[in-house]
Image (cartoon, rainbow, N blue to C red):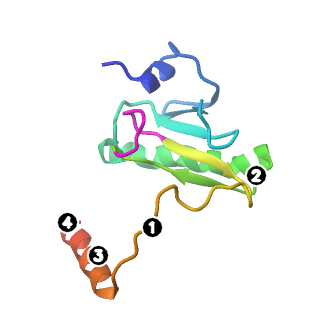
Amino acid sequence: MSCIFCEIIARTLPAHVVLDDDVALAFLDKTPLFHGHVLVVPRTHVVTLSELDASVVGPFFERVQRIARVMPEALAAQGTFVAMNNLVSQSVPHLHCHVVPRTKGDGLKGFFWPRKKYSGDDQMSETAAKLRAVL
């Protein structure tokens, strides 16, 4: 099965690369939220964050952090939005992290999906307990 991001990593598909090292490749998203929207992908083909080897998680996020750190200066932005989907809404089945430049008043409103409030503290406690039980 062909993976678009693996082809970009192998340089068989073109991309506007902003970072390239032994851990990750970062390149401009071809359908950006805003100009400068970067995708950071691990060189290893994995689909979700849980599949990424634990030894690579820290170095991978160091690359994400580095891009997020320089983006405001490089693009005259006030901050960044960093996001990652795992399976649901993941347009390419290869782990990737979005780093998007942000400026107050840019039109991006919080998250892209509607919020769903808890019915109360009891439901929050129950939900937290379910997560703790599996952790």
Q: Earlier in the sequence, mark 2 or mark 1?
A: 2
Which residue corresponds to mark 1?
115
Q: Earlier in the sequence, mark 3 or mark 4?
A: 3
Q: Main secondary structure of the magenta part?
A: loop
Q: Is residue 67 magenta?
A: no
The quarter in which the C terminus is drawn is bottom left
Res 45 → quadrant: top left
Q: Nearer the observer, disc 3 or disc 4?
A: 3
What residue is rendered at 48% in x and 43% in y?
Answer: 60
Q: Nearer the observer, disc 1 or disc 3?
A: 1
What residue is rendered at 55% in x and 52% in y?
Answer: 82
Which residue corresponds to mark 4?
134
Amino acid on which disc 2 is placed = Ala
Alpha-carbon neighbours of circle 4 within 10 Å: few (<14), some, or many (≥20)? few
Alpha-carbon neighbours of circle 2 within 10 Å: few (<14), some, or many (≥20)? some
Magenta range: 88-96
Q: Is residue 1 left or right of residue 35?
A: left
Q: Nearest the camera: 33 or 51? A: 33
Which residue corresponds to mark 3?
128
Q: Earlier in the sequence, mark 4 or mark 1?
A: 1
Which residue corresponds to mark 2?
77
Q: CA distance from mark 4 to mark 1?
A: 24 Å
